[in-house]
């Protein structure tokens, strides 16, 4: 198991957001996390690379326990790409510079190596002609594709997606989903928090329904979407489908 | 009009060398003080954002002590009181640079803190999620964005500090107004000399404003 989470709890002050989550992801698996707003799914995803520190429980990524105080968190994060709802590109850097920064600073690539890798990835996400553009001049869909390429430039073992299409205009959603589908097809291990039920059904190996800080139900897309076992899952799917 | 033109304006030319000497010291103390003040302010500003409580408190004490006392008192204390404690008399220009550095540093610290704080948290998260450590994230992701936002308030502080250097005449820094007063004491031409001195200050601050506006425009064009 490349991701193994055991009895994860997370509180903000008195408010418990995650109430004991057990979760595993196998190498190469694509897991989609669905659920209503406020169910804790984004917080949970952010615990997988310690952008949120956990209150109790254990998170083990590729054999490294993130909850162990001695873990070199930057080294583990280098293996986990993350894509944010708000893209979070570096606005003062050109597109290619966005892709080059971490490979140079963390992986020790030379500028030329990093640029070559960046160009290859921009080609992959269909933005080869935008390498000298600043993020502010790109559409939301283009920015998110750059953000995916930026994460891939670290050649991570796992990719986390935190509602990657939620802040996009509807007509820009597909171009981002297409890039994610390619990635899934190539065998990338992915955990995707999403409201795109079509994507979850088509691309997910497994779908996890979260509500009230708990994993309520897990199964193949077929099981979850056509034959949900839990009442809360049914209610949620009735509303969104 | 006679009240203005009835004076001996042409005679000012004779005193320009003296005033130029004053201008030199005004610029020396301003540039020296603000360069050190910026470094000091950056350090204190980042210290204010530190995870470590002690570091944070040292910065707070420095900032509050400076902001809570007048520049004039700071100058007099450093030039006349400090030497009695450290048993060493500072040259007045050095004392002047220290005063401007310490004083501007405290205000710049708050500018730095505010600007760094204003950069979206998502930027730090994006940097850290790529495996960049705290230091690299600050240096390459946060600081460049914060720096742009610092320029207008920094310009403001630079102008205030440049004007504050006129107070250093009381600790015998031979800057503009000090030189002006020397001239007037001997030649009784207060209107001509003090007007000229004021225009010198105006020339410095207007030039600085123009440079800052150009810098801001240049940075804007890129983003």
Image: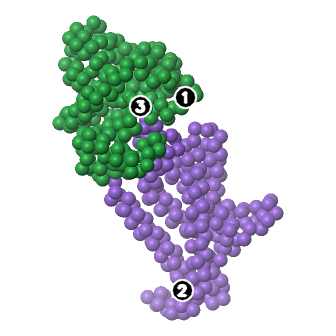
Chain colours: A green, B purple
Q: Which mark is residue A71?
A: 1
Chain identifier of the residue bearing label 2 in the image: B
User: Of callouts 1 and 3, which one flags the residue occurring earlier in the amino acid sequence?
Assistant: 1
The mark lying in front, picked from 2 and 1, is 1
In the displayed structure, does residue A90 sit left or right of residue B138?
left
Q: Image quadrant of residue B129?
A: top left
Query: Quick check: do tags 1 and 3 share a chain?
Result: yes
Evaluate if marks 2 and 1 touch, with contact meaning CB atoms under 8 Å apart. no
Task: State the separation of the CA atoms marked 2 and 3.
Answer: 71 Å
B121, B113: nearer the viewer: B121
**Quadrant of the drawing holding the N terminus of chain A:** top left
Figure check: B78 above or below A90: below
> Tag 2, which secondary structure?
helix
Chain identifier of the residue bearing label 3 in the image: A
**Residue at the disc numbered 3:** A80
In the current view of this chain or complex, which residue is farthest to the left? A171
Q: Which mark is residue A94?
A: none
A105, B189: nearer the viewer: A105
**Quadrant of the drawing holding the C terminus of chain A:** top left
Query: Quick check: do tags 2 and 1 share a chain?
Result: no
> Tag 3, which secondary structure?
strand
Figure check: B121 above or below A130: above
Task: Identify the residue at horizontal 58%, vertical 87% (top origin).
Answer: B17
Q: Which mark is residue B192?
A: 2
Task: State the separation of the CA atoms marked 2 and 1.
Answer: 72 Å
Where residue B211 appears, x then y in whole percent? 43, 68
Task: State the separation of the CA atoms marked 1 and 3.
Answer: 15 Å
């Amino acid at each position: 198991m490349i991701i193994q989470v055991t009895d994860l709890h997370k509180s903000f002050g008195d408010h418990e957001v995650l109430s004991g989550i057990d979760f595993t992801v196998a190498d190469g698996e694509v897991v989609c996390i669905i659920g209503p707003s406020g169910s804790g799914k984004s917080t949970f995803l952010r615990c997988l690379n310690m952008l949120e520190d956990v209150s109790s429980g254990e998170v083990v990524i590729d054999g490294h326990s993130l909850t162990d105080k001695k873990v070199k968190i930057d080294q583990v994060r280098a293996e986990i790409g993350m894509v944010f709802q708000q893209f979070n590109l570096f606005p003062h850097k050109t597109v290619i510079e966005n892709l080059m920064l971490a490979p140079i600073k963390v992986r020790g690539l030379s500028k030329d190596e990093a640029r070559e890798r960046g160009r290859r990835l921009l080609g992959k996400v269909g933005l080869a002609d935008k390498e000298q553009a600043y993020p502010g001049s790109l559409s939301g869909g283009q920015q998110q594709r750059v953000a995916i390429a930026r994460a891939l430039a670290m050649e991570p073992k796992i990719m986390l997606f935190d509602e990657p299409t939620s802040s996009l205009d509807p007509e820009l959603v597909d171009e981002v989903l297409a890039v994610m589908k390619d990635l899934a097809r190539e065998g990338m291990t992915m955990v995707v928090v999403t409201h795109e039920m079509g994507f979850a059904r088509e691309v997910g190996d497994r779908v996890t329904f979260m509500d009230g800080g708990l994993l309520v139900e897990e199964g193949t897309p077929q099981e979850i979407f056509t034959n949900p076992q839990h009442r809360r899952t049914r209610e949620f799917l009735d509303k969104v489908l | 009009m006679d009240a203005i033109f009835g004076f001996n304006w042409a005679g000012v030319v004779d005193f320009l060398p003296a005033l130029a000497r004053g201008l030199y010291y005004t610029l020396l103390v301003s540039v020296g003080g603000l360069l050190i003040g910026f470094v000091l302010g950056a350090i204190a500003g980042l210290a204010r954002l530190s995870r470590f409580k002690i570091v944070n408190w040292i910065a707070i004490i420095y900032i509050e002590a400076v902001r809570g006392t007048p520049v004039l008192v700071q100058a007099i204390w450093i030039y006349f009181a400090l030497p009695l404690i450290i048993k060493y008399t500072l040259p007045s220009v050095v004392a002047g640079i220290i005063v401007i550095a310490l004083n501007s540093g405290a205000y710049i610290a708050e500018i730095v803190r505010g600007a760094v704080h204003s950069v979206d948290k998502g930027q730090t998260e994006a940097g850290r999620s790529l495996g960049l450590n705290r230091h690299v994230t600050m240096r390459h992701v946060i600081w460049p964005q914060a720096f742009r936002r610092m320029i207008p308030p920094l310009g403001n502080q630079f102008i205030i500090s440049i004007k504050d250097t006129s107070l250093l005449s009381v600790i015998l820094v031979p800057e503009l107004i000090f030189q002006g007063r020397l001239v007037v004491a001997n030649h009784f031409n207060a209107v001509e000399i003090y007007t000229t001195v004021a225009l010198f200050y105006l020339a410095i601050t207007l030039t600085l404003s123009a440079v800052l506006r150009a810098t801001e425009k240049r940075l804007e064009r890129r983003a």
